[in-house]
Image: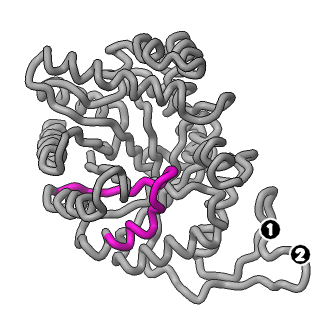
Amino acid sequence: MRTATTVEASAGEHWSQTADFVVEAEKLGLDICWVAEAWGSDAPSALGYYAARTDRMLLGSGVIQVGTRTPVAVAQTAITLSNLSGGRFLLGLGASGPQVMEGLHGVPFAHPLARVRETVEIVHRVLDGGKLSYEGTQFTIPLPGDAVPMRLSARAEHPVPVYLAALSPAMLRLTGAVADGWLGTSFVPEGAAGAYFAHLDEGLAGAGRSRKDLDVCQGAEVAFAADEDALAAMVAGRKKELAFSLGGMGSASTNFYNSAYSRQGWAEVAAEVRERWQAGDRDGAAALVTDEMVLGTTLIGTEPMVRERLRVWRDAGVDTVRLYPAGESLEDRLATLGRAIELVRETGSAS
């Protein structure tokens, strides 16, 4: 397995500290650093800076939210970042959710599947370098009238792999059909075959592709507990965070995280957590989250537990493990990340 992490350019800390983390992560041997966007800093600006500070590591947008930029603007960004980094850029795209798209950007969330599909198609056409003429249900380029098809003056000097963030069955099928990689979350390897891979494989097969054509990139928090008591405290501390994902993410009608957990065997608990969270009972919602739910979707445990979990992830079909290292300080997070990278390497050498 390859190793990756995700950073947010201004996640409650000084910009320079995040940059230091990225630089040191490359020295530790990390393969890929994804930069998140969500409702914080934009990803491309930070990626350009990190490209100038690093030499080897791949850098990806994790993710650019489709609909906040035109497809051609996305392609321009991808070409720029790929060229200036010497071909180290990965284009990660995602539909986001109704709250961020409509509540923050004022962009309709309707038809996310078609919007993502057409964006990928347009990006690929722009990367090919020809004049762009496209007519879809979401985008028409050029618009009817006097405008004529154009091409960018910039040219892509390197291939630009496209990754899609996907959780729903339809988006997973699209990922299998058109993407170079899948950015996933809420991943339980024991339940992944039905919840995720069946849909990915359907999309792959329909496009005449196989699993080897897709980089399965899954993410989880990694933290090492000294003993069982320390582990119990760690798990208890994560329950409210998971309750927020199940109950507070998305909108009143759409929560992709809740749906993903439901498909992996926790439908009843996920529904009740969401109901309590939406009613304002945050502590009650967190109390419903089980230890199994936390441990099943993270890499939290004693070192032997984490090593064994990595083997399970590998055997389930994960190609790249995206590590979110726990720690109170930069030094703590880097120490956790470094040990996790070593364990991934050990897991690979033992296969």
Secondary element at image label 2: loop
| Residue 240 vertical position relative to residue 84 in the rendered view, above or below | above
Task: Between residue 66 and residue 32, name the one nearer to us.
Answer: 66
Q: Quadrant of residue 291?
A: top left
Residue type, mark 2 in image: Pro
Horizontally, residue 233 falls left or right of residue 264, namely left
Residue 95 rendering spot, x and y as whole percentages: 60, 48
Considering depth in this image, is 197 or 88 the residue closer to the camera? 88
Residue 287: image x %, image y %? 40, 12
Disc ID at residue 14? none
**Dot 1 surroundings within 10 Å: few (below 14), some, or many (20 or more)?**
few
Rendering coords of residue 149 (x, y %) = 77, 83
- The type of residue carrying mark 1 is Thr
Q: Is residue 292 above or below residue 241?
A: above
* Disc 1/disc 2 C-alpha distance (Å): 8 Å
Find residue 144 and name its label: 2
Q: Classify residue 35 as left or right of residue 307.
A: right
> Is 158 placed above or below 316 here?
below
Which label sits on residue 140?
1
Evaluate if marks 1 and 2 touch, with contact meaning CB atoms under 8 Å apart: yes
Image point (45%, 62%), residue name: 43
Report the residue at 54% width, 10% height from top: 268
Please tell me how crowded label 2 is: few (under 14), some (14-19), or many (20+) other residues with Cα within 10 Å: few
